[in-house]
Image (cartoon, rainbow, N blue to C red):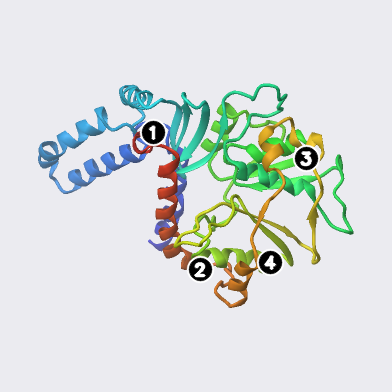
Amino acid sequence: MNEIQKVSSTRIPQLIAAWSGTSALFSRFGLQAAIAVLYATLERSVKRLAFVGVIPLLHLIFVNPHLPLTYNTAVLNATLQAEGYSLVARQESLTGYISVLDNMKDGFRAMRCDHSLLGGEWLNKPRGHPSVLNEPIYAIFVMLEAVRLVETKSSPATVGNEKHALIIGLGIGTAPSALVAHGVHTTTVEIDPVVIDFAKKYFNLSQNHTSIIGDAVDVNYAGDLLLPSAVSAITTAMFVFPSCRLFRETPAPIPMGTEDFTNIVIFCRKSPGPFTFREPVESDFLGSPARRQHLVPQHEVDETFYDEISRGKGNVIRRGQTGGLVASQMRSAVGHWHVMRSVLPDVVWENW
């Protein structure tokens, strides 16, 4: 019996992941309805289900905007278009509800996974700029490309040297596409095959790279820099790598409030010693105004944050000890959701 349970506990999640999003039945809403019917059948209460459940079931089929049926999608798009948006594609997947949306007024396209935005691009290239790639709507992904500019006394960064890059987590592919455009041999690891598919179809992800579908890491931290979990995540990076520099997407708020939810990039070396960023040349920008403005990291985290680490407020996160971050991540998720609500209108989040 134990062996059967062991096989079931590993095989069932694999089957759900493989079939997720392939039809309306294998959406989260379809599976919930199927479980309800199965439960009623086992409890011999089909008549009760027919009486009590018919209205919710009709609501699910004809009104719920997230059920991937033709009628529901038409209703959804009518709602979105009234707000100046249009649904491009969507699919339930193993990491959540993945969808692509066009903003018709401001002219950008974005990809969503549940209550997070994975990235976005402006639909039209800026006039007068022969940009190789579409312009990203988030500067933070441009800053990731600054890894090409890192140089040390023993290893100066030079343009054109053959280099390799490993990117964990694809998003819409802003950084990978740029690295490929610079001739960097790039490998991406992304757990969700739908994210990869949508990045290729709707965001022109470069095909000239190695794409691996798999789970690269158990902890993917996003949150408030004032929370202990943020200090722990950064403490861990600095424990593993002997030389690191941290840069914010935006300047630190003055005065500091009760929240500091921001994007941050950590540049680290596996060898000790300081490092800098070389001055970019014209080819580094790929004809992109966004890269011209945001490629070089600007807002370095000051010494007060490192003081938090030195005072022991951040613990090193070791293998098998990630459970301690769960409570803090729940709090961070609330803050993240609040930020996302300021990016897009409520009605878009609730229906898209």
Look at mark 3 in the image and give the residue it sits on: 184
Mark 3 to mark 4 CA distance (whole Å): 25 Å
Q: Position of residue 338 (x, y in %)?
A: 40, 49
- The secondary structure type at the circle numbered 3 is loop
- Distance between the Cα atoms at labels 4 and 2? 18 Å
Instruction: Locate residue 317: give its quadrant.
Output: bottom right
- The numbered dot on residue 352 is 1
* 283 lies left or right of 326: right
Q: Which residue is mark 2?
A: 228
Q: CA distance from mark 1 to mark 4?
A: 40 Å
The image shows residue 311, relative to residue 166, as above or below, that is below
The label number, if any, that marks residue 196 in the structure image: none
Gap between marks 3 and 2, in whole Å? 36 Å
Q: Nearer the viewer, residue 80 or 219?
A: 80
The residue indicated by pointer 4 is 240
Is residue 220 visible in the rendered image? The answer is yes
